[in-house]
Image (tube, rainbow, N blue to C red):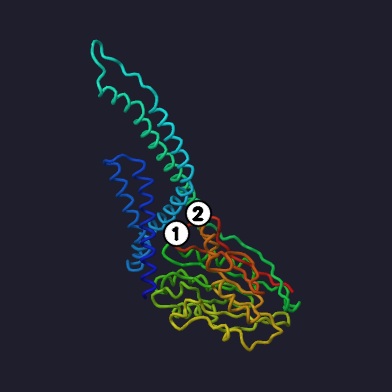
């Protein structure tokens, strides 16, 4: 509980800092004191409130109302993020232009300004002050205001365009990635076995039943031998999201559909067990630190699955030994494990291929540059300590309904000897 509170406090501090930065650049820097600045300031406060409702409030507000409030909050989250990113990138050219404007203003202030002499009277000090003020200070202020407004406009247009593109990508059809994988121990008779892997579907406040129906339709079109759902299927309880999951009953494969828990299954109010029971009723088997033998064309492959690492907090964590120990050494094994980082525990057991998700491929650039701080791979096929690991970008999204640089994915793995 203490870690959760600490994390929430950190998130709130970061959000407050980002909103203050946006206020400095988009409100204070582009307006003069007055009614316009006050309106923009309160607009930013309201948007920040909607973001908090999306992050926290939707867990306690009744679903219909909470889902409606989640939309503006999550869209502002993405827009806020890209506004901040673009403004930070523009800080250097902004600083350079400010220096140039400052030097130009100083040169102009050093010029000899002709002061009209009143007929028959002396030159007064206030005349000189007015002339200096009109000749140097006002243009400098106007230039800086123009610069701030130009930068704000560029950031605004860039952020809105990026988020618009990201929303379209997030709600578009997942990309089918066809990936051939060679396994040294695979019996040649099993060569060509196909596994349709999908992760991070994230049924939740912003998705509907059509999201699930489309994924099922696309997977069935692949005519896979095995379907693997590699965690983070849901962001809510069976009572809330059960109807959205029912199309999964129509999944088609020769040797069955399998599921392993992701971290989000442990974030739901009732825990993962109710979803395990629900999926079982839909014909999807959960691999709970266990394995099954897949027999194909007279050959055998072990398909194993482990719980997500977040389950350890409730005594339901991964057990590699339980899933992998004692098996025949001459048979290849494919492991379903939500987080790529679990490959470090899987490699000593001689796992041939690990299928993972969790990263979303970064979901929104440049988050893809941050993921490697926690995970050994962001997306695609990699070799980690002698074990091949394929990381799918996932078919859904978490938080903002936005994907930039990481389109949704359904993967068709074709095993080859």
Q: Is residue 51 above or below residue 232?
A: above
Picture quadrant of residue 255: bottom right
Q: How many marks overall? A: 2
Asked whether disc 1 touches disc 2, contact meaning CB atoms under 8 Å apart, the reply is yes
Rendering coords of residue 29 (x, y %): 36, 43
Q: Residue furthest left?
A: 121
Q: Secondary structure at mark 1?
A: loop
Q: Name the residue located 51 percent from the left edge and 66 percent from the top edge.
A: 212
Distance between mark 1 and mark 2 Cα atoms? 9 Å
Rendering coords of residue 197 (x, y %): 59, 70
Tell me the tag on residue 390. Answer: none
Judging by the rendered image, the residue that carries numbered circle 2 is: 166
Asked whether residue 229 is in view, the answer is no
Q: Nearer the viewer, residue 380 or 174?
A: 380
Q: Quadrant of the N terminus?
A: bottom left
Q: Name the residue located 37 percent from the left edge and 30 percent from the top edge.
A: 139
Q: Residue furthest top?
A: 120
Classify residue 103 as left or right of residue 179: left
Q: Nearer the viewer, residue 151 or 212?
A: 151
Classify residue 370 as left or right of residue 17: right
Rendering coords of residue 399 (x, y %): 44, 62
Picture quadrant of residue 48: bottom left
Few, some or many residues within 10 Å of mark 2 (<14, 14–19, 20+):
many
Asked whether residue 24 is in view, the answer is yes
Q: Quadrant of the C terminus?
A: bottom right
Q: Residue furthest bottom?
A: 326
1 or 2: tag closer to the N-terminus: 2
Q: Secondary structure at mark 2?
A: helix
Q: Name the residue located 46 percent from the left edge and 74 percent from the top edge.
A: 265
Tell me the tag on residue 400. Answer: 1
Rendering coords of residue 110 (x, y %): 39, 27
């Amino acid at each position: 509980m203490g870690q959760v509170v600490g994390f929430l406090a950190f998130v709130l501090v970061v959000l407050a800092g980002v909103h203050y930065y946006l206020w400095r650049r988009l409100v204070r820097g582009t307006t003069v004191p007055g009614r316009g600045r006050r309106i923009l300031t309160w607009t930013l406060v309201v948007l920040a409130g909607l973001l908090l409702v999306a992050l926290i409030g939707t867990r306690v507000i009744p679903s219909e109302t909470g889902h409606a409030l989640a939309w503006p909050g999550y869209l502002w989250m993405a827009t806020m993020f890209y506004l901040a990113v673009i403004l930070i990138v523009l800080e250097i050219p902004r600083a350079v232009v400010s220096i140039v404007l400052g030097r130009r203003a100083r040169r102009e202030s050093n010029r000899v300004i002709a002061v009209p002499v009143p007929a028959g009277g002396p030159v007064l000090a206030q005349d000189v002050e007015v002339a200096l003020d009109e000749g140097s200070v006002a243009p400098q202020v106007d230039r800086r205001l123009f610069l701030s407004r130009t930068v704000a406009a560029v950031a605004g247009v860039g952020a809105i365009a990026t988020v618009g593109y990201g929303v379209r990508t997030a709600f578009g059809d997942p990309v089918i990635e066809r990936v051939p994988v060679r396994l040294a121990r695979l019996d040649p008779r099993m060569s060509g076995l196909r596994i349709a892997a999908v992760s991070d579907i994230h049924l939740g406040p912003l998705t509907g039943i059509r999201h699930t129906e489309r994924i099922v339709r696309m997977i069935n079109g692949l005519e896979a031998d095995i379907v693997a759902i590699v965690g983070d299927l849901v962001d809510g309880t069976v009572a809330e999201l059960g109807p959205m999951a029912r199309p999964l009953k129509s999944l088609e494969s020769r040797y069955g559909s399998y599921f392993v828990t992701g971290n989000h299954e442990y974030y739901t109010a009732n825990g993962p067990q109710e979803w395990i029971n629900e999926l079982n009723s839909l014909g999807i088997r959960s691999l709970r630190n266990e394995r099954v033998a897949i027999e194909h064309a007279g050959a055998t492959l072990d398909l194993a699955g482990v719980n997500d690492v977040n389950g350890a907090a409730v005594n339901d964590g991964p057990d590699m030994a339980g899933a992998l120990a004692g098996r025949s050494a001459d048979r290849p094994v494919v492991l379903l494990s939500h987080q790529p980082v679990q490959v470090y525990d899987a490699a000593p057991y001689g796992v041939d291929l690990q299928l993972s998700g969790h990263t979303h491929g970064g979901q929104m650039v440049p988050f893809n540059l941050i993921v490697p701080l926690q995970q050994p791979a962001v997306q695609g096929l990699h070799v980690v300590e002698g074990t091949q690991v394929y990381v799918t970008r996932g078919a859904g999204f978490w938080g903002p309904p936005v994907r930039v640089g990481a389109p949704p994915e359904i993967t068709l793995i074709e095993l080859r000897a």
